[in-house]
Image (cartoon, rainbow, N blue to C red):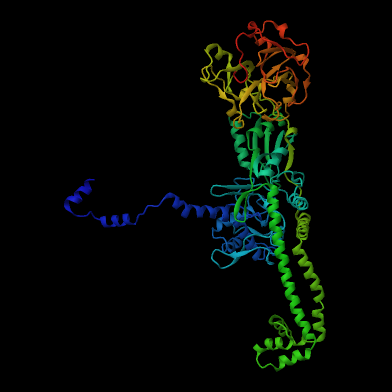
Amino acid sequence: MARKKRTEETGKKTPGAENVEGLRAEVTEQPVTETLETNFMPYAMSVIVSRAIPEIDGFKPSHRKLLYTMYKMGLLNGARTKSANIVGSTMKLNPHGDAAIYDTMVRLSKGYGALLTPFVDSKGNFGKVYSRDMAYAASRYTEAKLAPVCAELFRDIDKDTVDFVDSYDGGMKEPTLLPTTFPNVLVSANLGIAVGMASNLCGFNLTEVCQAAIEYIRDPETDLLGIMPAPDFPTGGEILYDRAEMEEIYRTGRGSFRVRAKWRYDKASNIIEIYEIPYTTTAEAVIDKVAELVKTGKLKEIADMRDETDLSGLKLAIDLKRGTDPDRVMQRLFKLTPLEDPFSCNFNVLIAGMPRVLGVREILEEWVAWRSESVRRRVHFELSRKKERLHLLKGLGKILLDIDKAIAIIRNTESDAEVVPNLMIGFGIDEAQAEFVAEIKLRNINKEYILRQIKDTENLEKEIADLEDTLNRRSRIHAIIRQELEKAIKQYGAPRRTTLVYKDELAEEPEEETTPDYPVTVFLSQHGYLKKITAQSLRMSGEQKFKEDDALRLTFEATNRSELLVFTDRCQVYKTRLSEFEDGRASALGVFLPTKLQMDEGESVVTVIDPGDYGGSVLFVFENGKGARVGLGAYTTKTNRRKLTGAYSDKSHVRAILPFRGETEVVLTSTEGRALILNTAQLTEKTTRDSQGVQLMTLKPKYRLKDAHFTSDSAVVNRSRYTARSLPAAGALLKPEDVGETQMSMEGE
């Protein structure tokens, strides 16, 4: 401000003021929306369409440019060449630099092992997909050529099966897609991160994909899971298989499943050998995590772990301490390390330049449609060539009528340029036919040669009719596609590497001995807040604290290792352990169970049960007056499943969930003011969780069952008045002395 003031006082401009004013004059305001439209949106579309998202042939542009360059270099049937030569030649089509091109080639190579069906036959050190630190050698040291399967990628590419466009500098032509004869989009794993969207396609077994495509062409409603039950990974491992989970992925193109390592136990040396790991992790990541757990004392059974990977393949060796159970150690390793890892699917594919998330059936539908068009274009190309050939032979046939006349016309023509026009006039043929006749060598202008040439006319006419019939019948196009798929299975098919392990068949993780066990008291609020308080803290604490609109729902004694069954209003039950909750205080609000257990949106807690050894029963009482007695054993699982659907019947709103051991009495009350006491011995235990049960209390049309309690928790004095000798029963109207303090129902009534 002082400088500006002095300038005004002297009437002189400060040095450089003219330049500053000139810069200010050039600055113009631009709305941010206009900037996004003119600058950011074109960039985003370029990344999506031209870089990150694969197309229906299963390739990104970088893959396609590299493979097409190698094809043009004659590396499909020729010998290997230095990778540096390939990288340099690819730069004619891909301007992103040699490092990016070589990275692309490494990932497509057989040596790296990232693909079930690699497209580059490599020689030298190309690193390993399962190793973070095993770097690949420089391009000047390694050699490569196209793998034999690439013949299926480029089959008939010169027969107008796909479109070609100019390269970035206009110096070459390159294909927009490769005419793959099998659904490579499902065979080759692909990960891409664009702007605002991403793609993550897992690989499937080539044999299963081709067989699924064949069956899909025959019947679009075929059971795809029965043919290709799950993805397949080049690193092997085991998929924890859940058919419903996989069906959702196949239907929507989104979802996740878990993959775990394969291992074996050498009893003689007391060593666990891990020889296959999940596709999503590396050997170094596993070793680092195990070392961390050993250091913190969470894996005391492990004495040492080392990487013994060699030319025969991956091997991680774990030395166990004497007397250690290897199965128990592996269960804990699966839980605590990347030896068991999730794979998230996002089947985002470019279809006609537009990104779309497709299910497996939709991908096959799009691929069959695209491949049908490629085959149709190839047939049309062959048809055009044969028609041209037939046309020329028909012109040659006219020459047969008078060979001497043709010779005389050529001999008597003074100018070379007039030969073709004179033949056209002399025999009534067009320019193409005349040009063909004029190009025949003098030694071939004889009757025998001409007859031999035109002998194929009849065969050509039959072939042309057959090709035209193929173009007009979709079934014949599909038959060609099926034949090509069957050929691919025969030549390039391989067994699955990733095996399936059904979740229900897995052994349950044993209880951790390191978890301390001590008595606790559990408090559950109406809104679903749970508190676990030790006996000592409970003696020292005062009144239990809840939110203003909340109150105590139930309380019970348990131990820190107790398992809990959390029943919700969506007829689901969540399994958890009290050891997973921190010890609380009476003054704290507790842990909000819907958040802790990752319940569905809007799902709320109905009650919490300590099942103990799952030897008791649970009584479900519904507002329509029915009740079902279900054994707690129905909620045991062989796996560590945290969520069970169909926990109880959804035919009517549940009013009470009462766990019990032995036989006991329960009092039911209705909105009419009636009460009914029954003995649980009157109810037969159901074998299915979602059973509707039997009618307990008969209700008039406008009334419903209000709640249910054990008689020991009720205020009923005249029990004989309300006891039912047989079920169902209407009960009796409550007397004032039997009402007592109003009981809280499960909804806080």
- List the single residue furthest toward the front: 701
Residue 418 placement (x, y as % from top left): 66, 89
Total numbered circles? 0
Considering depth in this image, is 179 or 745 the residue closer to the camera?
745
Residue 47 placement (x, y as % from top left): 54, 53
Residue 150 placement (x, y as % from top left): 70, 59
- Residue that appears at 67% across and 5% down: 717
Let me know if residue 450 appears in the view: yes
Quick check: 676 above or below 602? above
* Quadrant, the C terminus: top right
Let me know if residue 274 appears in the view: no
Q: Quadrant of residue 552?
A: top right
- List the single residue furthest toward the left: 10
Considering depth in this image, is 311 or 604 the residue closer to the camera?
604
Residue 15 placement (x, y as % from top left): 24, 55
* Quadrant, the N terminus: top left
Quick check: 187 above or below 508? below
Q: Quadrant of residue 352?
A: bottom right
- Residue that appears at 50% across and 53% down: 41
